[in-house]
Image: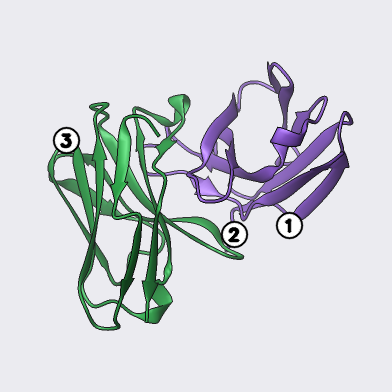
Amino acid sequence: DQQVKQNSPSLSVQEGRISILNCDYTNSMFDYFLWYKKYPAEGPTFLISISSIKDKNEDGRFTVFLNKSAKHLSLHIVPSQPGDSAVYFCAASEGGGADGLTFGKGTHLIIQP
Amino acid sequence: DAGITQSPRHKVTETGTPVTLRCHQTENHRYMYWYRQDPGHGLRLIHYSYGVKDTDKGEVSDGYSVSRSKTEDFLLTLESATSSQTSVYFCAISESAVHGYTFGSGTRLTVV
């Protein structure tokens, strides 16, 4: 049973526009959420995170929103740049994440010129 | 990534042979993880370690074993490789989820 779901396998956005990537989760015990970015032939790299006690976290062009009642989070990238083209993974943990993060299947973001 | 290296980067092996993948860190992080990435599945946890000689199973541990005899090294062993274990394997290190995980560059394993 998939606990973290990214229902859009791919997303195409024009350069300069906003990219919105979505993630849903089913485990109400998750208390920390993270986004990772992955280029081909490289390992995932940490992008931004949010604790369940917050509803928004911002870091430069990247903002993550958390809606606990809907068990939904989203990553906003504004403005989108060509280098943002990558696969984005949503991940979640409970109790500090020592026993591993649970990942979604990923969304391939394509930024078009 | 700086501080974490995986070896080998690529390997082709035959069905039924044993295979060991190595993850080495220089960050002195307590936690280490092995994930596999497959199309349509994202990243799935195989095994993890929370200290020397302390390991536990993840979501997809069948057919895999691990060992951690030193803080810096975490080994993943496929005792008898099968074609279903063809995948890209990622090692990750962490102080805690609050800090995020740092991933290695991956090992592409092909079992023929």
In front: mark 1 or mark 2? 1
**Residue closest to the eye, B85 or A29:** B85
Nearer the observer, A4 or B5: B5
- C-beta proximity under 8 Å, tags 1 and 2: no
Quarter of the view holding residue B24 = top left
Instruction: Give x and y (percent) for residue A56.
Output: 71, 21
Q: Residue at x 30, y 83 (%)?
A: B15
Question: Residues under labels 3 and 1: Cα distance?
Answer: 37 Å
- Which of the chains bears the disc numbered 3? B
Tag 3: amino acid: Thr
Residue beneath disc 3: B71
**Chain A: drawing colour:** purple
Q: Determine which residue is flagged by label 2.
A: A2
The chain under label 2 reads A
Residue type, numbered disc 2: Gln
For the residues beneath circles 3 and 2, the answer to whether they share a chain is no
Percent position of residue A38, x then y: 58, 43
Question: Camera-side residue: A77 or A65?
Answer: A77
Residues behind callouts 3 and 1 on a single chain: no
Instruction: Give the residue at x 84% y 47%.
Output: A12
Residue at which label 1 appears: A9
